[in-house]
Image: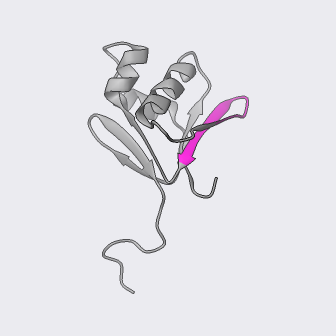
Amino acid sequence: MKNPVGPVLRMGDEIDQVIAAIEDDNPGQEIEVIDRGSYVRVQGEDRVVVTQESLRRYLGAEFRIRSLEAMMPSFSGRIITGSDSITWEKVSARREGALS
């Protein structure tokens, strides 16, 4: 994978459900799961998103997107958090507004 981005998640009871939600929110994209024992790296090429809606389908109606942040000690790429989604995306060499 050339530009892997995505969360690093602590192992726990909910890990399989979180991975399933990420896979649902990224149809047609290969999502790679690397088990490191105490944590799992979940990654896709250039951009990965997970929505609160998908997480709630797997983890229950009361699950809040901010609860995922507590399970995520690290990540690859740039993270964009919203009230109902988290997106990890490739960090470009040249950012908008940067001086040349």
| Image x and y of residue 91, in percent | 47, 62
| Quadrant of the image occupied by residue 99 | bottom left
**Taking 96 as reference, is 58 above or below it?**
above
**Taking 51 as reference, is 56 above or below it?**
above
- Residue farthest bottom in this picture: 100
60 relative position to 90: left or right: left
**Taking 5 as reference, is 40 above or below it?**
above
Q: Residue at x 72, y 34 (%)?
A: 36
| Image x and y of residue 33, in percent | 63, 35
| Image x and y of residue 18, in percent | 49, 25
71 relative position to 53: left or right: right
| Quadrant of the image occupied by residue 27 | top left
- Residue farthest front in this picture: 28
Q: Nearer the viewer, residue 73 or 56?
A: 56
Residue 11 forms part of the magenta stretch: no
The rendered magenta stretch, by its main secondary structure, is classed as strand
Q: Residue at x 46, y 67 (%)?
A: 92
| Quadrant of the image occupied by residue 24 | top left
Color theme of the render: one colour
Q: Which residues are magenta?
A: 33-44
55 relative position to 73: left or right: left
Count of numbered badges drawn on the protein: 0
Q: Residue at x 42, y 15 (%)?
A: 59
55 relative position to 46: left or right: left
Tell me the quarter of the image containing the C terminus.
Answer: bottom left
